[in-house]
Amino acid sequence: MNAHSLPPRSAALAPVIAIVGATGAVGIELIRVLEARQTPLSRLRLLASPRSAGRTLPFRGAEIEVEVLTEDSFAGCDIVFFSAGASISRNYAPLAVQAGAVVIDNSSAFRMDPTVPLIVPEANATALVPHAGIIANPNCVAAIATVALAPLHACWSIRRLSIVTYQSASGAGAAAMEELRAGTAAHLAGAPFTPQVLPHPYAFNIFSHNADVDPETGYNGEELKVVAETRRILNLPRLPIGITCVRVPVLRAHSMAISVRFEDHVTPDLVRARLASAPGVRLVDDRAANHFPMPSEATGTDDVLVGRIRTDLADPSGRTIAMFVAGDQLLKGAALNAVQIAEALGLGVAA
């Protein structure tokens, strides 16, 4: 029997949890989520690069010192959250598994590995088992989108998606968020500003997502990730998906316009009613007040906001619904989803 078909070594007690990349934007948010959800744990260990060693971060009224990540960091750990980039995950996640931990990885390292579950608990929690010690957290756009799409697919069978994203600075990390702040201040002051993190000026500007563009298809890496991961989460390996990913000058929370074609005719009222009862979804769909999902209202919110639900006029058959979605990239798109995976696994963690 695989060690990971058994409860972790401290299942009778609260688990030992570690965060790799604890000082990054997602790592900081993981600490906040564990505190906000009152996650049972016997010890929280914070791991990062040597330049962050010795820093302290607050957790439940105490200060926890950041340790240097090494190959021997995982002894005694039950759950390890990785939020430090794909190369770190590829190098260190197998070592954490060998030490007896279950890894929940926020990077792209294992997302398309067929032996590693790619999980959004509201969408495909049943795919969590079997696993071999590593669980992948999806791309932030795919995670947020599938919270809204999965309950609709369960009712009416999705046949095509068209997505345009409006992605915030948080998706590029803490340095990009700071660059947006600094660039905005410089722009308002009429001062020169040269971006260092992103390839174009961010303040008062939008531009195609900064992932590398495939010269043959013209799609960038972010778009290709969203397509592949959305198909995998929804278990629709051949689902046609058209997508354009754009950076917008918003600090955090991604938004997206989604057009969903179903197998049969579906009305906006039916979609609205289904989403009103869907886990992790909050309807924001007030036509009279012209009030629909906004990143400012999604920021700091666990739920994915969904609204502007209407028939897509481009499809006279009545099988296509257009809607607008907003979700916090650092929460449902990253840290919150990772903690929910641990909760779904039942690794001594309860909401």
Image (cartoon, rainbow, N blue to C red):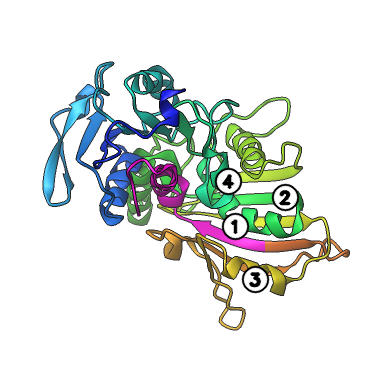
Question: At numbered mark 4, what does the secondary structure look like: helix, strand or loop?
Answer: helix
Provide the residue designation for mark 3.
Answer: 272
Provide the residue designation for mark 1.
Answer: 148
Q: Is residue 31 visible?
A: yes
Query: Of marks 1 and 4, which one's residue comes earlier in the chain?
Result: 4
Would you say residue 272 sits in the magenta stretch? Answer: no
Residue 72 in the image: above or below residue 53: above
Give the alpha-carbon distance from disc 1 to disc 2, as whole Å.
Answer: 12 Å
Mark 4 or 2: in front is: 4
Provide the residue designation for mark 2.
Answer: 161
Give the alpha-carbon distance from disc 4 to disc 2, as whole Å.
Answer: 18 Å
Instruction: Give the residue at x 70% y 74%.
Output: 269
Query: Of marks 4 and 3, which one's residue comes earlier in the chain?
Result: 4
**Amino acid under disc 2:** Leu
**Amino acid under disc 1:** Ala
Instruction: Give the residue at x 76% y 37%.
Output: 238
Give the alpha-carbon distance from disc 4 to disc 3, as whole Å.
Answer: 21 Å
Query: Of marks 1 and 2, which one's residue comes earlier in the chain?
Result: 1
Structural crowding at the residue carrying mark 3, measured as other residues with C-alpha within 10 Å and reported as few (<14), some (14–19) or many (≥20): some
Instruction: Give the residue at x 72% y 36%.
Output: 237
Quadrant of the drawing holding the C terminus: bottom left
Query: Of marks 4 and 2, which one's residue comes earlier in the chain?
Result: 4
Give the alpha-carbon distance from disc 3 to disc 1, as whole Å.
Answer: 11 Å
| Residue 181 placement (x, y as % from top left) | 34, 50
Q: Is residue 247 visible?
A: no
Query: Of marks 3 and 1, which one's residue comes earlier in the chain?
Result: 1
Where are the magenta residues, as a range?
A: 323-351
Q: As drawn, which residue projects farthest toward the right? A: 317
**Amino acid under disc 3:** Arg
**Amino acid under disc 4:** Asn
Provide the residue designation for mark 4.
Answer: 124
Question: At numbered mark 1, what does the secondary structure look like: helix, strand or loop?
Answer: helix
